[in-house]
């Protein structure tokens, strides 16, 4: 399986070149953001960082302070579907080009990926140590008042592994697997 | 409060959070052999395998969601459960400060995080007495993602069937279908048939304490368990919902009596990061034996 190397920030052309099923490794800045952060953005608060070309990572990491620096102890993805109401807005208003998470997202996000040139990258759920190993630095944090798991952490990733499961061409592995497995299970009903 | 007991419980938490039990590791290894190489499914299982090794070597949490903290404690008659609970709370606080547990306990109305994993329902204690003279403590850390895809079905159900084994089987498979990859599959199901809404789910969760490779002593339930795993693995959902042959690593079913008016099928979905471990404590509260 050929692995595609990505460097953040992503251009629209790069985001649009990715297809469902691609295996990628990402190097560069990742910003964590989950429920509370998305909620704030939705209510019109200005993001504390420039999200143009950025990748948002649905992750509530385990962080420990060593001296005056933060160290990431575990950093796997969290369930993305909770951001389904808001994610497309963040694409439209702030120009993010990638979203990392787990479990996939729904039609609003898929539509947003198509319209604004963005891609959904599925990390391996639960693989917190593999993910943490590929996060080589923590460079800062914003919105810490939301609590550590909900804050916006500025991570630096080296070859962070993901699979493209939703692309900017309307493709969604989640949609495909749901349709096929529904058919299979209905056919196997006792 | 005994310092030895606290130290034993911190070690139980560390080991549970960082080392996947042997029965689960064997199941993950076996699953690897069934996926075709080069597929997204094989890739997911490879990364999962790496993660299991790394967490153990670095003594760090397998998954950052260290979950809800469930203690199942068997004690001799007359044992001081209040003192045990105090020690468990102290151990949870220490383990959180050491990074074995994420700060995971949040007020349901204000959203405020207590910061030390202690609060109403945290940790969750289940005490049972037995006539043995030793204390056994089993700890399960259950992540939120997989907990969210659990479900309680009420039979009859127009789509799934009536109050019989077929209805039960269809309900369980419906839960697997709805979960897709959201519960970080390949998953392990604990199922409780019957009971009420509380006891049914408690029964489902306690099924997860069984060894993954055991055989149900009730042959009817044993067959149901095998059928569910076989059919789920033919559904094509696969690891992480990427498609593939491994959707479930196991299914464990228990049953309770019910009132004639109710028929619940309670399903607790556990992710591949199936963190449960147990110890037997000696007279001085030191660990004498590991259970899994
Ligand atoms: S479902 Fe399990 S493996 Fe997935 S993020 Fe939650 S705790 Fe981790």
Image (cartoon, grey):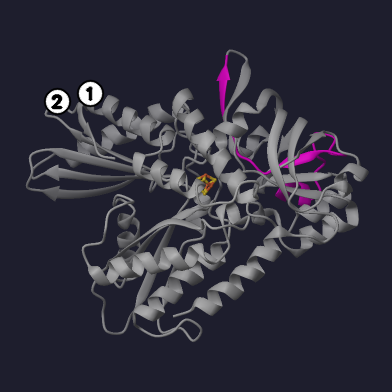
Position of B148 relative to B134 (above/below)? below
Q: Earlier in the sequence, mark 2 or mark 1?
A: 1
For mark 2, name the chain. B
Callout 1 secondary element: helix
Residue at screen point 51% across, 52% down: B34
Q: In the rendered structure, does residue A64 fall within the stretch colored magenta?
A: yes
- At 34% from the left edge and 51% from the top edge, which residue is drawn? B212
Q: Is residue B174 above or below residue A12?
A: below
Q: Nearer the viewer, residue A159 or B206?
A: A159
**Left or right of residue B270, residue A116 in this image:** right
The question of residue A118 being in magenta is answered with no
Task: Write down the quadrant of residue B190 in the picture.
Answer: bottom left
Contact between marks 2 and 1 (CB within 8 A): the answer is: yes
Element carrying mark 2:
loop
Q: Is residue B221 left or right of residue A19?
A: left
- x, y percent for residue A154: 72, 29
Quarter occupied by residue B95:
top left
The lab-note entry on whether marks 2 and 1 share a chain reads yes
Question: Quadrant where the N terminus of chain B lies?
Answer: top left
Q: CA distance from mark 2 to mark 1?
A: 7 Å
Q: Point out which mark residue B4 bears.
A: 1
Decide if residue B167 is on the left or right side of residue A2: left
Q: Provide residue A46's location: percent of width, then percent of height.
A: 82, 41
Residue range in magenta is A38-66
Quadrant occupied by the C terminus of chain B? top left
Query: Which residue, given by chain and number where applicable, does mark 2 sit on?
Result: B284
Q: Tell me residue A116's x, y (percent).
A: 89, 53
């Amino acid at each position: 399986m050929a692995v595609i190397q990505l460097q953040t920030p992503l251009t629209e052309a790069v985001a649009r070149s990715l297809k469902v099923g691609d295996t990628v490794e990402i190097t560069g800045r990742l910003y964590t953001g989950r429920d509370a952060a998305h909620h704030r953005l939705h209510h019109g608060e200005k993001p504390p960082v420039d999200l143009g070309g950025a990748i948002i990572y649905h992750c509530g990491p385990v962080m420990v302070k060593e001296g005056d620096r933060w160290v990431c102890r575990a950093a796997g993805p969290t369930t993305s579907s909770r951001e389904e109401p808001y994610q497309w807005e963040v694409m439209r208003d702030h120009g993010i080009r990638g979203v990392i998470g787990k479990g996939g997202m729904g039609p609003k996000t898929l539509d947003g990926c198509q319209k604004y040139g963005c891609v959904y990258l599925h990390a391996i759920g639960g693989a917190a140590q593999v993910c943490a190993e590929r996060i080589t630095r923590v460079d800062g944090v914003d919105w810490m008042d939301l609590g550590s798991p909900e804050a916006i952490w500025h991570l630096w990733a080296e070859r962070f592994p993901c699979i493209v499961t939703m692309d900017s061409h309307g493709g969604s592995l989640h949609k495909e697997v749901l349709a096929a497995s529904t058919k299979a299970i209905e056919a196997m009903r006792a | 409060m005994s310092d030895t007991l606290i130290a034993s419980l911190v070690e139980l938490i560390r080991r549970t959070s960082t080392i996947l039990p042997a029965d689960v590791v064997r199941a993950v290894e076996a699953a690897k052999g069934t996926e075709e190489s080069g597929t997204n499914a094989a890739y997911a299982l490879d990364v999962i395998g790496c993660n299991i090794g790394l967490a153990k070597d670095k003594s760090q949490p397998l998954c950052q969601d260290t979950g809800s903290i469930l203690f199942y404690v068997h004690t001799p008659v007359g044992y001081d459960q209040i003192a045990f609970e105090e020690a468990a709370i102290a151990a949870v606080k220490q383990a959180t400060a050491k990074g074995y547990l994420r700060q995971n306990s949040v007020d349901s109305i204000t959203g405020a995080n207590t910061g030390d994993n202690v609060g109403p329902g945290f940790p969750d204690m289940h005490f049972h007495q037995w006539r043995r003279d030793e204390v056994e403590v089993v700890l399960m850390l259950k992540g939120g993602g997989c907990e969210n895809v659990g479900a309680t079905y009420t039979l009859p159900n127009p789509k799934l069937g009536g109050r019989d084994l077929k209805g039960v089987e269809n309900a369980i498979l419906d839960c697997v279908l709805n979960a897709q990859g959201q519960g970080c599959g390949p998953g392990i199901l604990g199922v409780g048939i019957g009971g009420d809404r509380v006891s049914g789910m408690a029964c489902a969760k306690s099924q997860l304490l069984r060894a993954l490779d055991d055989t149900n002593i009730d042959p009817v339930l044993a067959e149901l368990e095998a059928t569910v795993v076989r059919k789920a693995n033919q559904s094509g959902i696969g690891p992480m919902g990427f498609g593939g042959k491994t959707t479930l690593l196991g299914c464990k079913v228990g049953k309770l009596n019910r009132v004639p008016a109710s028929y619940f099928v309670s399903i607790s979905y556990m992710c591949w990061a199936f963190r449960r471990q147990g110890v037997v404590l000696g007279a001085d509260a030191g660990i004498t034996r590991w259970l899994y």
